[in-house]
Amino acid sequence: MTPIVAASGARSQMRRVATASYVGSAIEFYDFFIYGTAAALVFPTVFFPELGHVMAVTASLGAFASAFLARPVGAAVFGHFGDRIGRTQTLVVTLLLMGVATVGVGLLPSTASIGIAAPLALIGLRLIQGFAVGGEWAGAVLLSAEHAPEGRRGFYGMFTQLGLGTALVLSNLVFLVVHTAFADSSQAFLQWGWRIPFLLSAVLIAIALYIRLTVSEPTAVGADDREALPGTPIGVLMRRQGARVLLAGGAAICAPMLVFQAGTFFTHYAADHLGYSTNLVLTVSVLGGFFAIAFAAASAISSDMWGRKRVTAWAVALAVPWSVAVFPLIETRDPAVFGVAMVATYALIGACMGPMAAFLPELFAARYRYTAAALSHTIGAIVGGALPPVLSPALLNAAGSTAVAAMMGALALLSFACVAALPETAGRRATRR
């Protein structure tokens, strides 16, 4: 094979990898995010109608957060098989599980129809979603990072993060279209209109599955490496780099904290307490998703030039004061201020998450890298994504917006401290032990 042909083949393979990482990530997180939107706007009425307003919202957001209980299990299980068997086969399983759970939510009868079985089944399906997504992100970023040429892992890792930003746009856009279509019949929207975004997932999953099956296994982790690993990947990881898993998890807190506060708690608060129309709230979120995509791309590409740690540290440092200020700004009850605050939040989300697809995998040895990246990302998602939306309503009722702002600022500051404690990784080889 001539060098020109080999180079052409490598470029073609990288395009397939980038497309598979992008599309798979977009569709898996679309499934994850539409649940969050529905939890804020629909589920308190459909699945928790007998509870008081505050308790119904808390229960709905608690059901949303239940997925994070299953994410560490998914991270450990899929990390094990991803390190032992391979990235691509594992990602096919996560995709299918997510699709089944999401379509199941769309088909689930309401509490009015089948009683308490409805919210219990809702939580069960959400746990399956969490189990699947626990192994999704790490596998998707490793496809990119381990195929990418030296010096361009930030760029190719970007596509997984763009998928997450695209999922923000898609999930809010689909709900916006459906809600607008049912503008004259809110009852019909609550009965069956909200199910359309979930059922649409079946088509999207089929597309992503087809694309993922065209991608080969990265050469960074070969059969010899897997067989030589002494003990289970998670056991070896904890013995060799356990402290780094915790630091990496802390570094990953900031982005999900802002994502899920903006996508669930802020969305509910704006529609329910501030009286903004659902269409306005969803439109602002769609616009914010585009800013998340743009800033994720900029920060990921910049990390190839200036370093993962430096770019991430700057983004998280900016997020610390913003995390304190954003909720008081939303509480001004000015629609324009609300829109700017939300869009700026999504821009910061993009800046924080852009380098992570290269940064986290580069922190760990190849033989247990899937497990390590999955667990560290999951730690950040649990602390940053699960707890704040559930705690925020209670904090708001007990101590006002200052308590919510203080919690968010403290989490962002913790994330910054963990980033500062980690080493720079740009320029290191991803194929070495």
Image (spheres, helix red, strand yellow):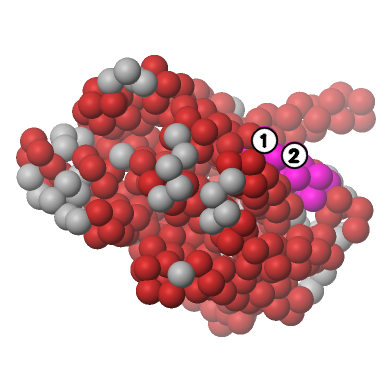
Q: How many circles with numbers are drawn on the protein?
A: 2
Return the residue at label 2: 294
Quick one: SS at disc 2? helix
Return the residue at label 1: 290
Q: Tell me the quadrant of the picture where the C terminus can be found.
A: bottom right
The span from disc 2 to disc 1 (Cα, nearest Å) is: 6 Å
Q: Residue at x 82, y 69 (%)?
A: 424
Q: Tell me the quadrant of the picture where the N terminus can be found.
A: top right
The reply, left or right, for residue 203 in relation to residue 431 is left
* Magenta range: 288-301
Could you say which is closer to the camera, residue 236 or residue 168? 168
Amino acid under disc 2: Ala
Measured along the vertical axis of the image, is residue 45 above or below residue 422?
above
The image quadrant of residue 179 is top left
Amino acid under disc 1: Phe
Marks 2 and 1 in Cβ contact (< 8 Å): yes
* Residue 344 x, y percent position in the rendering: 69, 49
Q: Residue at x 81, y 64 (%)?
A: 314
Tell me, yes or no, if residue 426 can be seen here: no
Q: In the image, is residue 220 part of the stretch drawn in magenta?
A: no
* Residue 357 x, y percent position in the rendering: 68, 53
Measured along the vertical axis of the image, is residue 323 above or below residue 267?
below
The image quadrant of residue 367 is bottom right
The reply, left or right, for residue 30 in relation to residue 123 is right
